[in-house]
Image (spheres, rainbow, N blue to C red):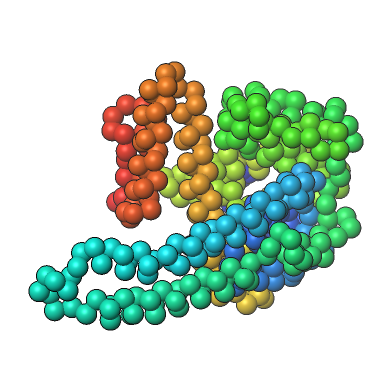
């Protein structure tokens, strides 16, 4: 049974140990870009864990390409977030003072010292602003030296990055059956099919080659398969922070491992004996036992939080892509209003919410049984 249905069986303890100690460790793009999104503690812990794997790390060429193309955006987005928070808190005390002046609480017979309350608010606000500014100043800037890329350049030296397609024909061969795979929901990548629907953002050019964005994950997977086949690789551990169903096997809310189809495909066309996947936070969790690394629980939590935030963002993007295919402007306006309300719910109220694409009710909230 096990040999015939290998994709449905997780590695044994001995097989996992062998993967960790001897296997090729393949990193996905999001793992590299998350290094810019992480607080310093989580970033240092992840880099330290990767450093213990130096010499066995490898990335497909498309991972390296996506990292270089999206690196500055990742840096800018993180700095923009802290700048927004700084601007918000900087205006907090002045805004509160103006509103309290309009209320004229001192004339209402209430035994309160408005000035004292404002002084306490200003003291607390100043501490918050100082903390956020410190975090902001520690972030990588797009115009400064990039210590993250320097570290990755050291970890991913000669032989650690796959070869680029040498022609458009070579690139096209990686995605030749991509449309049918996506229709049949063959992993990975079919959840990215919507990226091809907007002509203005459907592709990009690099070294004279035209890359279709919706096939990014499929290109990465095919380049990994080719590398495994050509190098007769036996053990592969793939690290990705992508949480989508076209990579992971999920049942009843639990993630069991990589999609069985992925395990079967890589074994069918290469000499790979064991293939498994971890998320970046799982990498950190197991780094202590397999690599002897010192990893704090706080660092693991930081990596988990980044991954969860990205999945929430991707879910919103996928929902919005569906709006663009509605018929009338009135229908589209109604859907945009629904998603705006969904964003407010997620920010202001605890719970896991989702918007219905069609029918009643408009919103669903998921609760623990």
Residue located farthest toward the left when viewing the structure as drawn: 109
Most foreground residue, 82 or 93: 93
How far from the left and from the top, in percent, is residue 74?
64, 54
At 51% from the left edge and 76% from the top edge, which residue is drawn?
Answer: 130
How far from the left and from the top, in percent, is residue 119?
33, 80
How far from the left and from the top, in percent, is residue 304?
52, 60
Most foreground residue, 85 or 103: 103
Residue located farthest toward the top when viewing the structure as drawn: 327
At 32% from the left edge and 45% from the top edge, which residue is drawn?
Answer: 365
How far from the left and from the top, in percent, is residue 40?
61, 71
Q: Is residue 243 left or right of residue 360?
A: right
Instruction: Give the image quarter of residue 363.
Output: top left
Query: Would residue 287 be seen by someone viewing this image from the given angle?
Result: no
Q: In this view, does 88 lie above or below 111?
A: above
Most foreground residue, 177 or 143: 143
At 55% from the left edge and 71% from the top edge, which residue is drawn?
Answer: 133
Q: In this view, does 308 lie to the left or right of 5?
A: left
Most foreground residue, 326 or 242: 326
Q: In which quarter of the image is the N terminus?
A: top right
Q: In this view, does 367 lie to the left or right of 63?
A: left
At 77% from the left edge and 66% from the top edge, which residue is drawn?
Answer: 145
> How many labels sit on residues?
0
Q: In this view, does 325 lie above or below 87?
A: above
Query: Would residue 54 be seen by someone viewing this image from the given angle?
Result: yes
Q: In this view, does 71 lie above or below 207?
A: below
Instruction: Give the image quarter of residue 23.
Output: bottom right
């Amino acid at each position: 049974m096990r040999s015939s249905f290998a994709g449905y069986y997780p590695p044994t303890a001995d097989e996992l140990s062998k993967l960790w100690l001897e296997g090729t460790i393949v990193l996905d793009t999001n793992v590299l870009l998350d290094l810019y999104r992480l607080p310093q503690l989580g970033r240092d812990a992840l880099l330290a864990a990767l450093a213990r794997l130096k010499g066995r790390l490898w990335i497909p060429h498309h991972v390296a390409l996506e990292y270089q193309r999206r690196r500055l955006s990742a840096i800018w987005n993180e700095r923009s977030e802290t700048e927004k928070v700084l601007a918000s808190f900087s205006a907090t005390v002045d805004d509160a003072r103006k509103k309290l002046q309009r209320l004229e609480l001192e004339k209402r017979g209430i035994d309160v010292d408005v000035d004292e309350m404002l002084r306490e608010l200003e003291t607390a606000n100043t501490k918050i602003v100082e903390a956020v500014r410190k975090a902001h100043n520690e972030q990588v800037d797009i115009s400064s030296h990039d210590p993250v890329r320097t570290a990755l350049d050291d970890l991913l030296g000669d032989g650690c990055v796959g070869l680029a397609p040498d022609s458009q024909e070579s690139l096209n061969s990686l995605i030749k059956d991509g449309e049918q795979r996506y229709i049949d929901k063959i992993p990975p990548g079919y959840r990215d099919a919507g990226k091809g629907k907007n002509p203005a953002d459907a592709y990009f050019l690099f070294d004279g080659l035209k890359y279709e964005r919706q096939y990014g994950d499929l290109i990465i997977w095919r380049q990994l398969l080719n590398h495994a086949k050509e190098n007769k690789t036996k053990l592969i551990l793939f690290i990705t922070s992508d949480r989508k169903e076209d990579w992971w096997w999920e049942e009843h809310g639990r993630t069991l491992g990589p999609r069985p189809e992925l395990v079967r495909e890589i074994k069918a066309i290469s000499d790979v004996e064991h293939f498994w996947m971890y998320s970046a936070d799982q990498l950190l969790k197991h780094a202590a036992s397999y690599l002897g690394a010192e990893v704090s629980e706080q660092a693991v939590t930081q990596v988990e939080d980044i991954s969860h935030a990205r999945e929430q963002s991707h879910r919103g993007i996928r929902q919005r892509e569906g709006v663009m295919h509605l018929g009338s402007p009135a229908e589209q306006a109604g859907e945009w209003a629904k998603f705006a309300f969904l964003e407010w719910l997620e920010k202001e109220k605890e719970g896991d919410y989702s918007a219905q694409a069609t029918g009643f009710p408009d919103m669903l909230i998921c609760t623990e049984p």
